[in-house]
Amino acid sequence: MKVAIPDMISNSYFPALAAAELGCFRREGIEVEAELIFPVDRCYQALRDGKVEFVAGAAHGALAAFPEWQGVKLLGALAQGMYWFLVMRADLGIARGDLAALRGRRIGAAPWVEMGLRRLIAAAGLDLRRDDIKIGPVPGAVGTTVNFGLTAAQALENREIDGFWANGMGTEIAVSRGVGTIVLDVRRGDGPKGCFDYTIGVLATTERLVEEQPDTAAAAVRALVAAQTMLKADVSRAAEAAAKRFPPRETGLIAGIVERDLPYYDATIRPQSISAINDFARWLSLLDDEVPYERIVATQFSNLWQRQ
C-alpha cells in the first residue's frame, strides 16, 4: 500500500512519514510506503484513481478529486491547525503580522496551499488586485516530485520572489540563513481571527476502503497515533524517520522543527474543525453545501484517536 504525501522533506505531514519509516504501519499488520506526489490535488486524484490507498495532506485538498466530499473519508488529524508560514525577504524589514506590507509583493505558494494565504489576505481587508499582491508558483517547483519548501527557500535566497507561504522546513532554512523573516505563523496565534481552522493536515482514504477493509483503515489510524506518541516520547526519533528520505542538512533540522509541533500532535478531528473547513471551502467556491461531519470523517474510528 502507499500513502501519498505532497511535500516530503517537511514537517507538515511528518507523522505519516514517521508511521511508514519507523514501522508503525507494519506493527499494525499493514505495509505502507510513503510516496511524494506534488501538489496535494494530485495526491487526492491518485487516491481517487486507486493508485494509492491513503493521502497525508491538507483536508480541503480532497475536494479537488472528491466533489462535495463524496467518496473520501478523513481518518485522523496529523496535527491540529493550519500549518504554513508566511516568510518574507529579510531585507524588506516587514514586521511580524504586518500584512499591509505585502502590497506590491510577489509571494510563492503551492497550488491549493495558496488558498489559505488568499483567504488570510482577504480577511485582513486586503485585495490582491487592488493592492498588487501577486501569489503564484515558485520558480523551479514543477513536476510531481517537488519538495516545495526547499524550492521556495532557494527561490527566496535567489531573490526570485519576495516571500513564500510554505512549510516549517523551508521556513527554518530561510530564517537560519538570514534571508527570510517570519511574518505569519498561524498555528501560534498570528493572522486574522479563525484562520487557525481554515484547514488541517489529515490522513485520508476512500469511503470504499473504509467500507470494504475496515480493519485496514483502523490499523492506519492506530499507526498514525502510534507515530505521534512515539515522537512525543522521544523527538530524536524524527531524525531516524527522516534519515532515508531527507538530505543530511534537513535530517539534522527535522527533530527541532517537529519538537515545536508536538503540542499540536493530536489525531482528533473535531466537528468545529470540519465546520470551519467547510466555510473555508465555500468561500473558495470548492463546496456548495454544508456537508455533515459524519459524512466527511470516519467517526467509527474516533475511539482510536487517543493512545489506548
Image: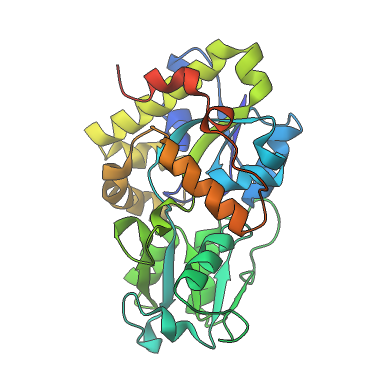
Examine the rendered structure and indicate whether residue 210 appears above or below residue 67: above
Task: Indicate whether 307 appears above or below 21.
Answer: above
Give how far across and how far down residue 276 sits, in percent: 47, 48
Position of the C terminus by quadrant: top left
Left or right: 216, with 169 as reference point: right
Residue lying at the far right of the rendered structure: 49
In the image, residue 103 sits, relative to residue 84, either above or below, namely below
Image coords of residue 199 (percent x, y) = 49, 49
Query: What residue is at 44 percent from the left and 36 percent from the top?
Result: 271
Q: Quadrant of residue 186?
A: bottom left
Point 50% across, 62% down: residue: 150
Q: Where is residue 219 in the image (x, y as percent from the top left)?
A: 48, 17
Image quarter where the N terminus lies is top right
Query: Which colour assignment does the render follow?
Result: rainbow
Q: Is residue 87 left or right of residue 282?
A: left
Q: Is residue 245 visible?
A: no
Q: Which residue lies furthest to the left in this view?
A: 233
Image spot of residue 288 (x, y percent): 68, 48
Q: Can residue 215 be seen in this view?
A: yes
Of 148 and 211, nearer the camera is 211
Which of 122 and 74 lies nearest the eye of the viewer?
A: 122
Q: Residue at x 71, y 56 (%)?
A: 143
